[in-house]
Image (cartoon, rainbow, N blue to C red):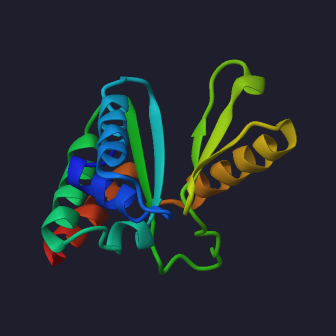
Amino acid sequence: MQTENYARAVFSGRVPELAEDELEVRVRHRMAGQRIAVPYDLVIHESALRIRVGDRVGSRAQLDKLLGLSEADDITMRVIPFDLDGFARAGSTMTYVGGPVAKLDTVVRDVPHGSAFIDSEAQLGAFRNRFRRLEAVALDPQRSRDFINRLAKEL
């Protein structure tokens, strides 16, 4: 779901810093992973949409990419706005990869030193419940597109 420049900016913030060739390998890998067409449910907190990773131009390009992707048949995109009452669960990035066999599910979390993979049954259950709660409070897909479009115009 990231532009190449956005992914590069994300990986550039890693501690310790990556060598240029390792940075490029990770960016290429991230871009290649986006070509896999599978059903995808995405919930994004407003903070993730507003924070500038890189510069203003790159942030606008990232929002434009999300808008384009939100129109795809296999992607459901929802936004959680700041002003949602009673919701204080905007933590960090979580990618829940699930399928028909729940024991094979995995959660990927971006952390300062790279990525953390979580696959224990107890932790997966907690993340599965967390994602369901996120989906339940998020804006519907059309209101989410309208929200992202407004943010893009602000840049």
Depth check: give the residue in front, 99 or 79: 99
The residue lying at 19 percent from left, 67 percent from top is: 152
Residue 26 spot, x, y in % from top left: 37, 41
Confirm whether residue 101 shows in the render. yes
Residue 84 spot, x, y in % from top left: 53, 76
Depth check: give the residue in front, 95 or 40: 95
Q: Quadrant of the C terminus?
A: bottom left
- Left or right: 35 with respect to 40? left
Q: Is residue 107 positioned above or below 74 on the image? A: below
Residue 87 spot, x, y in % from top left: 63, 74
Confirm whether residue 73 shows in the render. no
Depth check: give the residue in front, 144 or 101: 101
Q: Quadrant of the N terminus?
A: top left
Figure quadrant of residue 125:
top right
Q: What count of labels does the image hold?
A: 0
Figure quadrant of residue 139:
bottom left
- Farthest-out residue, top: 100
The residue lying at 72 percent from left, 49 percent from top is: 127
Residue 147 spot, x, y in % from top left: 30, 66
The residue lying at 45 percent from left, 28 percent from top is: 39
